[in-house]
Amino acid sequence: MTVRRLPLPALVAHCVRLGVPGVGLWRAPVEEYGADAAARLVRDAGLAVSTLCRGGFFTGTGTGTGKGKGDGGDWWDDNRRAVDLCAVLGTDTLVLVSGGLPAGSRDLAAARARITDAIGRLAPYAAERGVRLAVEPLHPMFAADRCAVSTLDQALAIAEEFPADQVGVVVDTYHLWWDDRAPAAVARAGAAGRIHAFQLADWITPLPAGVLHGRGRLGTGSIDLPGWCALVAEAGYTGPVEVEIFNDELWERDGVEVLEQTVGAFLAV
Amino acid sequence: MTVRRLPLPALVAHCVRLGVPGVGLWRAPVEEYGADAAARLVRDAGLAVSTLCRGGFFTGTGTGTGKGKGDGGDWWDDNRRAVDLCAVLGTDTLVLVSGGLPAGSRDLAAARARITDAIGRLAPYAAERGVRLAVEPLHPMFAADRCAVSTLDQALAIAEEFPADQVGVVVDTYHLWWDDRAPAAVARAGAAGRIHAFQLADWITPLPAGVLHGRGRLGTGSIDLPGWCALVAEAGYTGPVEVEIFNDELWERDGVEVLEQTVGAFLAV
């Protein structure tokens, strides 16, 4: 998504050229390209698919496809398809953006309970296909309309209801950096083998309207990214480190240039 | 601030007409009108000044005056003036927006330590003048550029370093509604007599650019406002309930109409 303007073949080719060993994919571009063809493309290039984004939207808000269609009422079918796509692509991790408040509701606790129930239904289906679920806490500014799971403690509490190899969490610096309780939760998640994905983006201000596409390139913002990398490493995490930057300005620029710059910034961090 | 287009005399007159017993004032309009004249105006009308907004910006970011000038480096003089103004206006509560990360810093914990030190210096000065400080946790989306104190737990931890009659907290629904730990912190703050202000605003999306002026009118958003009122009452709070809505659309409308509508919505909540 950081280089969303790059078509899949170019993304794969330039990742290989730059020594990037894996890539986190999003459903929409994969489905547009064709799941089997996309799977062949990355496999033939020797590229790992670190995660698939995304399942979720269990509360009847938003959409699981990232395409802006659907009202999420069909969460079961949509999430089953996401799991199936993971299996086709050969990734073991489906990232879940769980959904915000149902229409007319003001009850975040009820939304989280509904999310937990849905995950409990999805997890065995995923496990049978070699896929584990990664509950992503989103920044509290998304609690109403995107994800009622706002802290790593909340995500971990949901995950802990299920086996660690079935449900874990996403540690994303952009969503968690402000939280003084997050470091302890990272340690707890790591010790339990529940860090299923680790993503980097920086925090910059002012936020743009809608606040979704205002993430900062690595090193340009307020987050101590080396500190977060150390924290996650100390928690025992040895998996992929993804860079996920939603930024309208970045998306206007040449994708190859953005990818090269991102690799440089990543190595500097 | 909810009716910022109303000049002070009109604000006071219409509050009295509508049976609003008190008003939270901001420094800029008071200083423009003249402190002594403003104090006389509200006193003669029999209106209480619930709080003064604001002191703070202890970390060298932003400004304490709300006028957009100054770099905050002069925090001591600025905050002393704010305390003095409280005394002139006859309010016992100065709201503190504590400031974000200092320029170039990525260390939120250090910013909070600096804030605690500054409050420790300011509190005795304020106490001598009959003014108590109210540490306001701001929504985590303001952590970098406005307030490194993001949760009620953090605000309370700072306040608890000092006597309860000198330093307490602000409970503002807009900033805290997402936090599943806030209810317990409200109870703790109430039991200790540390809820020094209680403010209502609703959460609506999408957020506008800059996210500062996107608060919702009471009852139009995602927050269970009656639930929050009950929570604060159960914690033993019997003080004023303020409505503080920053909203560009609201500010474009007639101030008297906004005030009347706000009173209606307040009573409905």
Image (tube, coloured by chain):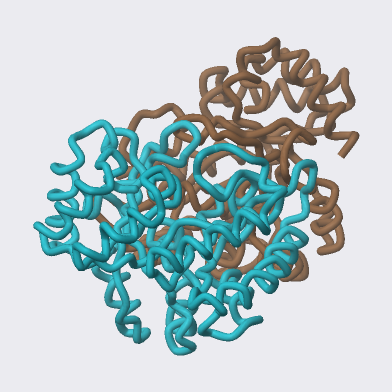
Chain colours: A cyan, B brown
Of A153 and A260, the residue lying toward us = A260
At which x and y percent is residue A210? 50, 35
Q: Residue at x 56, y 73 (%)?
A: A126
At which x and y percent is residue A265? 16, 56
Q: Where is residue B22, by image quadrant?
A: top right
Can you say whether A219 is above or below A121 in the image? above
Q: Quadrant of the C terminus of chain A?
A: bottom left
Give the number of marks. 0
Which residue is at the far left? A17
At which x and y percent is residue A183? 43, 75
Q: Is residue A239 left or right of residue B148?
A: left
Res. B167 visible in picture: no
Q: Residue at x 79, y 16 (%)?
A: B13
At which x and y percent is residue A168? 51, 76
Q: Is residue A56 left or right of residue A219?
A: right
Of B216 and B98, the residue lying toward us = B216
Q: Where is residue B247, by image quadrant?
A: top right
Q: Is residue A84 left or right of residue A74?
A: left
Res. B168 visible in picture: yes
Which residue is at the far top? B254
Q: Is residue B9 left or right of residue A166?
A: right
Q: Residue at x 34, y 40 (%)?
A: A247
Which residue is at the far bottom? A191
Q: Residue at x 48, y 65 (%)?
A: A94
Of A261 and B254, the residue lying toward us = A261
Of B104 and A194, the residue lying toward us = A194
Can you say whether B235 is above or below A67 in the image? below
